[in-house]
Image: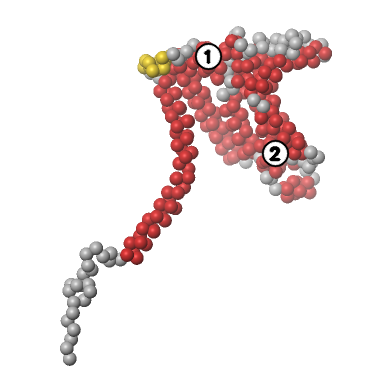
């Protein structure tokens, strides 16, 4: 019987014809695995990439460029001409009495505005946390000052604190107090500016506290009431510890806002005195000093130095806040 000796399709040696994929299914599987890894590992980065692009363009680059300008002598009219001076601008700022005066004013105005503001916001949030009639109306009303522009609020309060025809002095006259020169008196001016800040930001912080209070489980209050705790004791022992992180957040936020305070004192000065923070710099803040150096004295290098001093100050405040938070956490 004859045996067929025909050549197999794969050739005499068993090799695949040229151009034929030895394992098409395995190749496809590897490609799918690679695409899956790129999807799982790379998709999150693709989603957050727009944020980092915007941050690099509008935050990181200006920050680095401001630091570079602070190392040069640069005038506003000739920004393309820079003279390297190293850290001379920082040395001059350290020896400048106006800087220390602005720093002290920023601190005092920050304390005068932040402490009453947060305390009032905490009390207001505590009241709004109860089931009141028209609670939605009161919550919207509390947020209305925040929606008001800085310019409008500062102009209205400037008229209220006017020395001769302001409503504040008129009401003080009713109780026998003479007219107060709110602008030219240091502490009076800082109190008036702090009032503007308090009016604008109390409702905003109150709503932050309210949101945090509503996240506290009701069974904690019920347990405290069963134990005989009064409303005040429940507030101190349940509410305040329950919103501690929110309180810390508002303190940090208010500190940043106080460091950058600019619009309120500028408009309160009603003219050239607003830039210098009064005739004697009695309420000049770091923000006003930055504006004076850059846009009045045309020294952009010094203005950039003030900006970096403000940035470093915020870093110091943040570090101190973290240290205090850890110390308190260990004690509790």
Q: Is residue 113 above or below residue 101?
A: below
Task: Specify whether residue 81 is in view.
Answer: yes
Name the residue: 58% across, 40% down. 330
Q: Is residue 14 above or below residue 242?
A: below
Q: Residue at x 44, y 13 (%)?
A: 77
Residue for point 78% across, 49% down: 226
Q: Residue at 45% of width from left, 15% of height from top?
A: 76
User: How many C-alpha atoms fall within 10 Å of the one at disc 1: few (<14), some, or many (≥20)?
Assistant: many
Nearest to the observer: residue 128 or residue 23:
23
Residue 107 appears in the picture as rendered:
no
Does residue 290 sit above or below 255 in this rendering? above
The percent coordinates of residue 190 (x first, y second) are 65, 17
Nearer-the-camera pick, 119 or 287:
287
Which residue has dot 1 on it?
Answer: 292
Label 1, secondary structure: give it.
Answer: helix
Pointer 2 residue: 210
Quadrant assignment, res 36 = bottom left
């Amino acid at each position: 019987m004859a045996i067929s000796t025909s050549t197999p399709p794969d050739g005499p040696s068993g090799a695949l014809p040229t151009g034929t994929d030895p394992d098409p299914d395995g190749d496809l599987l590897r490609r799918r695995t690679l695409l899956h890894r790129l999807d799982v590992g790379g998709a999150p980065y693709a989603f957050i990439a727009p944020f980092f692009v915007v941050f690099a363009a509008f935050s990181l680059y200006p920050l680095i460029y401001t630091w570079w300008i602070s190392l040069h002598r640069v005038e506003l009219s000739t920004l393309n001409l820079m003279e390297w001076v190293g850290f001379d601008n920082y040395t001059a700022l350290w020896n400048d009495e106006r800087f220390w005066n602005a720093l002290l004013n920023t601190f005092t105005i920050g304390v005068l505005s932040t402490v009453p503001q947060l305390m009032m916001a905490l009390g207001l949030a505590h009241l709004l946390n109860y089931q009141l009639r028209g609670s939605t109306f009161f919550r919207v009303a509390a947020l209305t000052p925040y929606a008001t522009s800085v310019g409008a609020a500062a102009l209205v309060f400037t008229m209220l604190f006017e020395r001769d025809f302001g409503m504040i002095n008129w009401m003080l006259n009713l109780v026998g107090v003479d007219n107060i020169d709110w602008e030219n008196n240091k502490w009076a001016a800082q109190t008036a500016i702090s009032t503007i800040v308090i009016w604008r930001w109390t409702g905003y912080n109150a709503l932050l506290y309210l949101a945090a209070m509503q996240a506290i489980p009701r069974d904690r209050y019920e347990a405290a009431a069963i134990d005989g705790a009064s409303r005040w004791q429940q507030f101190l022992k349940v509410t305040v510890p329950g919103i501690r992180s929110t309180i810390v957040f508002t303190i940090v936020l208010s500190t940043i806002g106080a460091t950058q305070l600019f619009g309120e004192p500028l408009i309160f000065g009603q003219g050239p005195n607003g830039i210098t923070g009064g005739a004697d710099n009695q309420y000049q803040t770091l923000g006003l000093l930055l504006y004076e150096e850059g846009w009045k004295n045309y020294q952009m290098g010094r203005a950039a130095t003030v900006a970096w001093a403000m940035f470093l100050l915020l870093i110091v405040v943040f570090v101190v806040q973290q240290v205090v938070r850890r110390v308190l956490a260990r004690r509790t």
